[in-house]
Structures are given as structure tokens and as C-alpha cells.
Amino acid sequence: MPQREKPSKPHLESNPGAASSPESLLGDRPWAESCEATARPASAPVELIGRLQAIVGRENCLTRSGELFAYECDGLTLEPRRPLAVVLPETTEEVAKVVHACREFDIHFVPRGAGTGLSGGAHATAGSVLIECSRMTRVLAVDAEDRFAIVQPGVVNAELSTAIRHLGLFYAPDPSSQQACTIGGNVAENSGGPHTLKYGTTTNHILALEVVMPDGSVQHLGNQTGEMPGPDLVGAFVGSEGTLGIVTEITVRLTPIPEAIETMLAIFDDVVPACRAVGRVIRSGVVPAAMEIVDRRTIEAVEASVYKAGLPKDAGAVLIVELDGSPVCMEGEIRTIREACNAEGCQAIELARDEEERLRFWRARKGAFGAMGRLAPDLYVHDAVVPRIHLPEILEKIGEICDRHRLKLANVFHAGDGNLHPNICFDRRDEDELARVIQAGEEILKACTAVGGVITGEHGVGVEKRDYMHLVFNPEDLEPMYWLRESFNPDGVCNPGKLIPTTRFCVESNPKARGYDEVPL
Amino acid sequence: MGATGERGAAISASASESSVEVREERVSVPGGAVDRVCEPRNVGELESIVRAAGIDREGLLVMGGRTRLHWANRAQALGLGISMSGISGVDEFEPEEGVLHALAGTPVQEIREVAAKEGWELPLDSPGQLSTLGGTIASAIGGPRAHLFGPVKDAVLGLEVVGGDGVATKCGGRVVKNVTGYDMAKLYCGSYGSLAIVTGAWLRLRPASAKRITLRARSSNDKERFEAIRALSKLTSVRALVWSSTRTVGKSEITVEFGGSAEGVEHDRAKFNQYIPFEEIAEDTVDHLRDERSRTGSPVALRARVLGTRCHEMMEVVLDAGLRVSADPGTGTIHASGSLPGPSILALIRERAEQAGGFAQFETLPDEWRDTLDVFGSLGGTASIVSTLKRRFDPAGILNPGRFVTLGPSDGDAQAALQGDLT
């Protein structure tokens, strides 16, 4: 194997703002990158901030402590980091100028959408500039005939569908945070959602991208047909968690609103037969738009909350099945779903009679995370995927892990995709409980990967799971990922420390050796 | 050329050590030929051969079913052919899950048959009996059923590859939803083996349709008729729509394949019949239409992809050039074949395709035309990224050298950098 050239020592001068010295923890690996360390002259911040204010305007460059507080983290509230500044550009040109300025002062930069991500992909690194794209909110073009739209990255997911509904079209990816999350963030995370079972994830709906590269140049990837000569750079970019550049325009595929939608809710004694019913449906040939399971503890939380959906409180699990498509096919597909659920002994099965009832069914699912706020001050939303046939056994295993660690567990998950979301309710002020949460999370990931699963299905790796990548990939598997990153982002200035282990060879087996963790995950 | 002095010394040593057969066989491709072909029996042997080729700086011609060897730019410095036939077979199949794993040399038809026995359908529509899984993924070859299946990359859950450094790696996985790390499989699909050699893949299957029928009608070629049929192709049970046309015949032939529940198929068939009368024909007609595209025997064959609303206009351009057309209006894809007096018409067709939002690729063309025409088309502003990727993934420049995207004269620095690496 040809020897790789070691990158020149990047950004390893200590940063006064860093919690600990990265060099001391990274040992004798001079090529190791640290997301804490930035090399910059002492006067850089003042000069740089002046430059940034000149680019985006003083009011769109946040530097005060109180302003920066809100940007210390994304939806992963552990490991907050305060950036040097937050800029709010409105155009591609402004983003490119900001990147050029950051490079001039040798300051890292981190792209961010609405900050709803759950794996820390948009966490600032200390001393970095956060480039928040939430003010890039224009829908630049809609072509109903060829079914695409060109949008800026700050367009909110659900608002795009609302804006084009009159054309009989919608934007299919529907992450649970779709009322707040942005299309740019969805591109970075390759976001999924309940309806990915039929419609796929974000990557299936992105045709082309305009990107400000880490060197400040502007590149156009893909075209409106979704296919281009050469390697699929759009496909490689989607899901890259902001480590390959900053998306400034997105051409998305639009989908016709289905003629008919039918939603069913099946009640089971336990989550295991509900999972088996999902397997029966998949095997039947019917492809529902969504199949979601909510377990007993979640039902209890939902029914005690403002999201109350009228579910029987003694139900062990609820399976929501949504069908969509041609009206003439609905009757046969509904019959198939009923047969699958009845074969697994479901207590009852309801078909939504109208839109109001359909929304009530979905409240049981979509209100789950909010309702869990009643169970404990903090909620750790895990995300892992297993082959669907292993769902029953893995749920039992996760229950056993949480019982052993004396933790409150509630499950809400995309059963059709095998995408689990074990939610652990805890109080972070209790250090012992926090440690048990972290330990249980690691054991859950190991259990999932042991049956052929992966460590994340839709939340991304970010900083949360970066050092668990070894559970899925060996060091050789990771090497091409470094090559990809280095091809776009050779000096690592764009969103450093995310997605792949920051050091190539050493820390995989020791997540606590990442060099900057105040709170190990 | 070889770093060790004697040409191919490392490959010979590696082959001898691992008892990989290297046989005398001449395989000609545009711009070059190999006189030796080896057939590794497993991934370990392939790794050894690729490592040795890196030492020898021997360009590798990677072959699947050998159905598309002509579809390439002029090869540079080829030394050894690698047949992937020895790395073959469906080695894992989970009918309950609807996923399977197959090795790269497996004929796609064989995988289709394995899946069909358990009520599943492989959503890959590459032509003929010989196309292999690895070749299909590397060249991202679809067919008329891409209308339903989508692009090849959508069927791939995970990939195993051997890189230009001779190291086997994997990406993705066996589950249907996965964002663990970069989506490397997207990069390898359609990269024509120039970044890595595909050795195996996890594939997602589709439930087989309960009912399938195929209909045919004859039609005029006017835009109004074309657009009406294109609109009908959005009906949910349409699996494929092929519009076949030539200027000499004047009439077009429309073939539609339906699949799904009996109610849905009947409903959608009625919609088509309300517009013009269709007759039911053999269920496998679309297979034949697909396969004909890959064995035209014509000196020129091209594939253009444009926006759906520009498909008719593009078809007219190609028909005016005197070529036969087999188009998929639902995806804006046009296959055309025939004879042309010179390469300038192809350049014009490419220009028009780019104006219509897409591109044109030339699957077959006279060898001398390759001096002026890039088979795959321009990379535009992304040339420097692709150049960097190539250098990273294939540092010795041995994987299908020169045959995939080449960097045009306007690509300047990227071209110089890449050529510098390859020599």
C-alpha cells in the first residue's frame, strides 16, 4: 500500500479558550487534528470581527456573550462550545466573503441551519465563526412542470411544502423537526423522517447544489435532471454534515401530493408483536408511506400531556400505518394491513375517518418527544438502525440494558425502516445517572451493530457518535472518507472535528481520549 | 514503466505467489489493449493484484460482463485485464428483510432470478444476460424501468471495493436507512471503476408486482401527443414507458409496462386507453427494447438526459440527425443510434442536451472521433474536485486510466495535475 503523505501540522497552537490542551491528550501524533485548536495571531478576533461586520452588517454579526450563548450547541445540548462570532449572511456572495475572511485570519468556521440537529454537527468549535444560514430564506424558483424548486438553505422544510401546495406538489422528506429545521440543514444531515419508508431520505430529493467551498470559491454540483457525467458529487455531499463546504442554493425534487391518504392505528399488548406485524406488511408487497411504533411508556407520557391522542393507557404499543397513492388501491392495501395486524393478535385497529382523526393518530407519534419532557428534565434521543427482522429481539435487549442501568426508557421509532429511537429520560445534574446514560447508550449501539445494524439512521454522526464509528467501520474503511473530506476541505478549516474520528488511528477504542471532552458521550 | 525495472514484475510475482491465473488473452478497447487477463477468485487475490499493479504502474482494465468495454474514452497505459467473473454469487439473502448481498461478478440476471423466487424484484434494469452487478454499479447503467426504480445508486445499500491502493474497504451497510459516515457508495456508483473496483454490494429489493401487463400503441410524433402520454406516465402503476421512433417510418411506437395491484393496473390501463387505443402484448417486451439499446450494431449510439419538458424537443433534434430513437419520456432519457457523417453533429446534440438542462454521452462512436469528443461529457467547474478525488483514491493512476471522465483543455490546472500524477 502506498504510504500516505502526512498532512502538515494543522492548527495545533494552543487556544486560550480551550478547556484542555489538545496536544497533551493527542500524544505523539503531530498530524492529529483538533477541533479546539486554532492558530491565529492575538489581534485576529478584533480585526476579523470588523471584517465580518463589514461583510454582513453590524446587526448580522453577533459577538456579545449573551448573543453567543444561544449558539453554543445544536439539539445535542451536551458539550456546548462558544464561538468567536456568529454571522448571518443572506447571499452566496456574503458566505463566500465570510469564508475568505476566516481563512485570512486562520479561523475555523462552522455552517449551521436552524440548529435542530441531534448529533452536534452544528456545534461550534471554540474560537470559530459560526455561519448561520437561517436568513437565507428565499425560494428562488419553482418549476411545477419539471417538478423542482431552487431554494436558499435557510428555507424551513415545512414552509417549502406549504408554499407549493397550491401546485399539487410537496417536498417529501419530513424530519420530526420539519416545522423548524431548514433544507440546508437537511442536506447536511441527509435527514429522514416518518415517510422515508416510501419516499427515501433527503439524498433522494436533491438534484443540484451551489456550494461555497472551504477555500471560498463557489462550485455548482449536479443539474436539474439529477444526473451528471462523472462521480456523483451531489450524492457524496448530501449527509456530509457541513464538513465539505457550505450549501448556498439547493435544487430539490418536488413530489405530487398523493390522491388518497389513509391512516390506520393498531393497538397491541406489547411492542414485539407490533414489530412482527411490520414484518408481515413488508413481506406482503404493500409499501406504506410510513410505519411507526410508539411503546407503552411513550403512550403514558403522551396521554398525560397536551398531545393527548385518546389512546388506551393500558396499550403495550401502538402501530401507525399510513398508506398513500391511487384511491383505487386503498381498499386492498387496507385489507392487507388489517390481516397483518390481526395475525399478530392486535387488540384493535382503527382507520382514520377524516383528517381530524388522522392528525389525532399522528399526535401520538409527533407529540412523543415533547410529552417526554414530563418524565425527566433531560432526554437523550438515540438513533440507530437494525435489520427489521431483528427489531423484536433488539427492543428486548435495549429494555434489558436500561433496566440494568436503572434508566427510564421510552421507544418511538420508524419501524418500517428498522430505525430505532430509544429515548432515555434522565437528569444531567445527577452525575451518576449521566454516566449510566452514556454507558447504556454505548451498549445500545453495540447491540445494534452486533446484529448488522448501524449507529445512526438519520441524526448523523456529528460529535456525538464520531468515536463510535469503529463499531461499524475499521480504520481501512475510514481512510476513503478522509480522502473525500480532504478533496473538498484539504486543510480541515470547515467544520472540523465532526463525522469521522479526528485522529486516524488511535482513539477509536477510547472515546474519552478525544482531547476536548468536558462531558464524554 | 515499472518501478522495479522489468515490466509487470510485481504482478508476475504476486500472481505466482497467490497462484492467480494470468492468461494470455487480448482484449481491445478504445485507445489500447491488454494481452494478459487475470481472474482473481476472491477479494484477497484482487487486493494482491492491484497492489502489485501499483508497484508496476500497470494500468488495469477491469471487466465485468464485457458488455460496455467500448463505452469509454481512449485508454492510457493499460497493462493487465482483470476479469471479475471469479468473484461471483449471491452469498446472502434475507427474504424477510428484502435485502441481499451479491459479489461483483454475479450476472444481474442471476440476482433477479434469486430474488424472484421469494417474491422480490431487483430494482436494477441493466441490459442483457451478461451484465454483472459490478459493471452495472460502476457504469450506473439503467434501463426503461428506471422510471420506477430510480437510478442504480438508489438500489445500493452498501458496497465493498478495492481501492487503487489495493486495500479492500466497505461503506454503507445492509440496512435501508443509514447516515453513518460519508455516503461513499454514491461516489463509487457511476465512477466507472476509476476510483475503486467494486467487489460486492448489499442491495435493497422491491416487492414483486402482483399483476403486470404490457401495452403497445402506434402514434404520431407530435408534441401534443407526446406530452399527453408523458403526463399519463406519472400514473402510479406505470413501470416503464418507451417511445420508439424514426423519421423514415414517421409513426412512433409507444410501449407501456404496468405493475401493481390488479385494481391499480386496470385503472391506469383504462386511462391510457381513453386517450388512444392500446393493445396488450408480450409481458417481457420492455426487456427486449432495453436489450436492443445495447446491441444496436450501429457506428453511433448515444444517451441523452434532459428535463422532461424538453424531452420531445431533444428527440426531434436527434431524429433530425437521422438517428433511431428509443426514449423514456418519464425520465427525460433518450437513447439513439445509427450512422452520422461526422462528429460535429454529436457535438451539436451535446450542446442542445446541455441547453435542455442535461447532458449527452456517446456509448458507441468511431474510434477516430474520440480525438475530438469526450465520451462522457464535460465536468465543468468540478474538474478540479474530480481530479483531486482521482489522485487520492488512485494515487498510482492504475484504475481504468484515461477511460472515464477526462479533463478537457479548458480544465487547465486540473488536467496538468492529473496528467502529472499519471505519468
Image: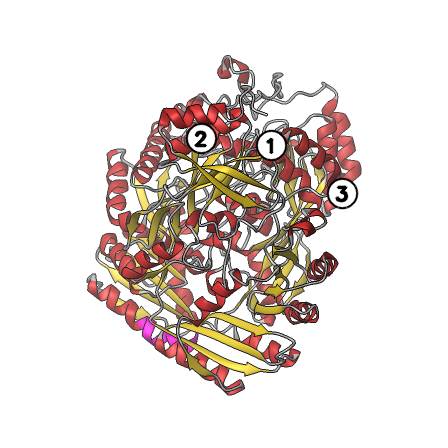
User: Is residue A327 located in the magenta-colored stretch of the structure?
Assistant: yes
> What is the residue that sits farthest to the right in this orientation?
A54
- Residue A485 seen in the figure: yes
What residue does disc 3 label? B410
| Separation (CA) of disc 1 from disc 3 | 19 Å
Q: Viewer-proximal residue, A213 or A6? A: A6
Q: What is the x, y in percent for residue A54?
A: 80, 37
Q: What is the number of the mark on residue B391?
A: 1
Callout 1 crowding tier (Cα within 10 Å): few <14, some 14–19, many ≥20: many
Residue range in magenta is A326-334
Depth check, front residue: B92 or A136 = B92
Residue A265 in the image: above or below residue A402 = below
Q: Which amino acid lies under the numbered mark 3 shown in the image of this protein?
A: Ser
> Where is mark 2, residue-wise?
B49
Say which label, 1 or 3, has the lower sequence index: 1
Is the magenta region chiefly helix, strand or loop?
helix
Quarter of the figure that contains the C terminus of chain A: top left
Q: For the residue marked with disc 2, what is the amino acid?
A: Ile
Query: Which quadrant of the view contains residue A87?
Result: top right
Name the residue located 34 percent from the left edge and 52 percent from the top edge.
B99
Q: In the displayed structure, would residue B53 be above or below residue B104?
A: above
- What secondary structure is marked by label 1? helix
- Secondary structure under badge 2? helix
Q: Position of residue A166 (x, y in %)?
A: 60, 71
What kind of residue is marked 1? Arg
Residue B22: give x, y in percent of width and height: 42, 34
| Chain holding disc 2 | B
Give the residue at x 57% y 20%: A6
